[in-house]
Image: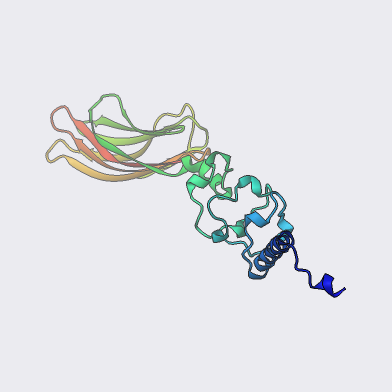
Amino acid sequence: MKSILRRRPSPALVIACLALFVSLSGVSYGVATGFIDSREIKNNSVTGTDIRNNTLRTFDIRNNEVRGFDIRSSTIQGGDVAFNTLTGADINESSLGKVPSATQADSAGTIPSLRTVALTTVAEGAAPVTLATQGPLTLTGACEADGVNTRARLYVQSTEANSAGGGEFNDPTIGPGDAPVLLADVLDLPAPPRTVGDRSVFASAPSAKAFTAHFGSIADAADAGSCQFVGDVVLEG
């Protein structure tokens, strides 16, 4: 019996035991120190249940080793994305729906717009000139003789019933077929100088079309007579 115990192990046995010890101690060391890398993990074996919630950070994902197909579809949420990190390049704009409050922008065409009417000259007795239109409403300027005097006048017409206009003169009812309604008047006598008047007028229709205008009107009865109009018109609706 003593002779058996005194026998030395063979070289092959020593090498085999050493290899087993190294392999076991290496895995144990990795587990103990937390330095397990992909070599110790079987491919496609780690699942979401193996990762503690709220522990994976950006610097844990390196060298593009975690890719889109490694993440289950529809699982990334807003709380998983750092604030102010997504840019336009990260978003497919064509897939976005309309912002709820942006539906109000569909009626942006109803925002009032300003139109400037350049200096417009009309000879006395000539046909009136159109200064502005808004929907059914038309604002015209006319130069009319009044005996030896000359009048620069602003008129409005409407193709919509129950329209209204006002200014120096008011008319609460304007409709299709009505003659042009006088809103403002500047009178000039034959003797110089010519007369300049500052007039504000407005008109509206039930369809919510409207305008407000501020004009400088010039009446000049000298010679054959003439009138001039210049101003701004705010169009609404």
Depth check: 128 or 40 in front?
40
Q: How many circles with numbers are drawn on the protein?
A: 0
**In this rendering, position of residue 78 left or right of residue 119:** right
Q: Residue placed farthest to the top in the image?
A: 126
Residue 16: % across, % down: 72, 60
Q: How was this image coloured?
A: rainbow
Residue 191: % across, % down: 12, 38
Depth check: 213 or 64 in front?
64
Residue 212: % across, % down: 38, 44
Q: Residue placed farthest to the right in the image?
A: 1
Pick the quarter of the image with the N terminus.
bottom right
**In this rendering, position of residue 187 left or right of residue 11:** left
Q: Residue at x 70, y 52 (%)?
A: 42
Q: Is residue 172 visible?
A: no
Depth check: 154 or 233 in front?
233
Residue 215: % across, % down: 29, 42
Q: In terms of image quadrants, where is residue 140?
A: top left
Q: Is residue 96 visible?
A: yes
Q: Is residue 50 above or below residue 165?
A: below
Q: Is residue 64 above or below residue 18?
A: above
Q: Residue at x 53, y 39 (%)?
A: 206
**In this rendering, position of residue 117 left or right of residue 92:** left
**In this rendering, position of residue 161 left or right of residue 15:** left
Q: Residue placed farthest to the front in the image?
A: 3
Q: Residue at x 50, y 58 (%)?
A: 84
